[in-house]
Image: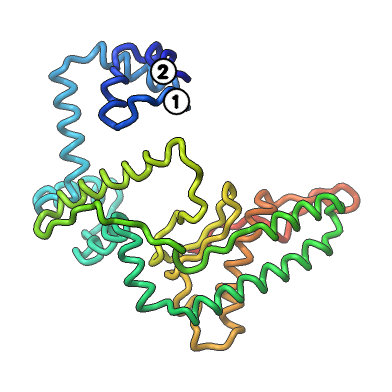
Amino acid sequence: MDRVQLKALTPDFDWDIYLDAQGFAGLQTFNVTEPEFYQEVDRLIQSESLDDWKTYLRWHLVHAWAPYLSMNFQQENFDFYSHTLRGVTAMEPRWKRCVRWVDRDLGEALGQVFVAKTFGPDVKARTVKMTREIEAAMEDDLKDLPWMGPETKQQALDKLHSIVNKIGYPDKWRDYSSLEIVRGDFAGNVRRSAIFESKRELAKIGKPVDRGEWGMTPPTVNAYYDSQMNDINFPAGVLQPPLFDPKMDDAPNYGNTGGTIGHELTHGFDDEGRQFDAKGNLRESRWRSRPRKF
């Protein structure tokens, strides 16, 4: 939608004030994926009193920030949302929560320390070599597939050859120099971190895609294939013992992490798990998509 259409959709919400506050006063094009949602919000703006809106928003503010406030807020929040609704018996130790929040808000700063201690250049070189060898094996497999025609095979090989391998950590670390972290102001640090990340995301609008950006932090124990970027991503966290152990020989590492690399590669080629035999009968693919390992 353009700006005129957006205003017509929600006449009681002042988009000019909102966008100006966000630093996007000149933005003219909007991807409104759920128009009915915005229409309902506009209806509620008209039908509910200002006092009710203030109460509603005040409650949501306290609820959202409860995990970062004093223990009485944390305990009340845990007792209902974790214990009553989900059956969790005890709150995580503070150190675990702190590590998780630091990874969320300062993931690449934490990642630099993690990589320096656990993922040296020799380990990265071994995992890069393993990834390339598995891609070479997949190339041989693609060439031998009986159910794929020559033109389709060439397209598949072109895609395989253009996959970008992101191993361990980003080539360029995120710059957190504009983010102020204050000792003794935990909630303030969380708030400033959220504002920092919001501005970082909004600053992407109208600019070329950063193909070097990662969707996971280096300490994360997981891996993924990005279909829009055509890259596979293996953070340093998943390239640790017992999943990948540089002190062991290649066999167990290829059997474990190598299998994960193959799994992520196949997401770019057969993510439905269906193929037909020579007689036209549906049979399950040996490349069938499986749930993520981690």
Quarter of the figure with residue 172: bottom left
Instruction: Name the spot of residue 63 as percent of width and height, x first.
Output: 19, 40
Judged from the image, the secondary structure of the residue bearing numbered disc 1 is: loop
Q: Nearer the viewer, residue 142 or 202?
A: 202
Badge 2 marks a residue whose secondary structure is helix
Residue assigned mark 1:
30
Label annotation for residue 188: none
- At horizontal 25% and vertical 65% (from top left) the residue drawn is 96
Disc 1 residue type?
Answer: Phe
- The part of the image, by quadrant, that contains residue 110 is bottom left
| Mark 2 burial class by Cα count in 10 Å: few <14, some 14-19, many 20+ | some
Q: Are marks 2 and 1 in contact (CB under 8 Å)?
A: yes
- The crowd level at tag 1 (other Cα within 10 Å; few <14, some 14-19, many 20+) is few
Position of 24 with respect to 242 (left or right) is: left
Marks 2/1: CA–CA distance: 7 Å
Residue depicted at 13% across the width and 56% down the height: 182
Give the left or right position of residue 79, taking residue 123 as reference: left
Colouring used for the render: rainbow
Residue under circle 2? 3
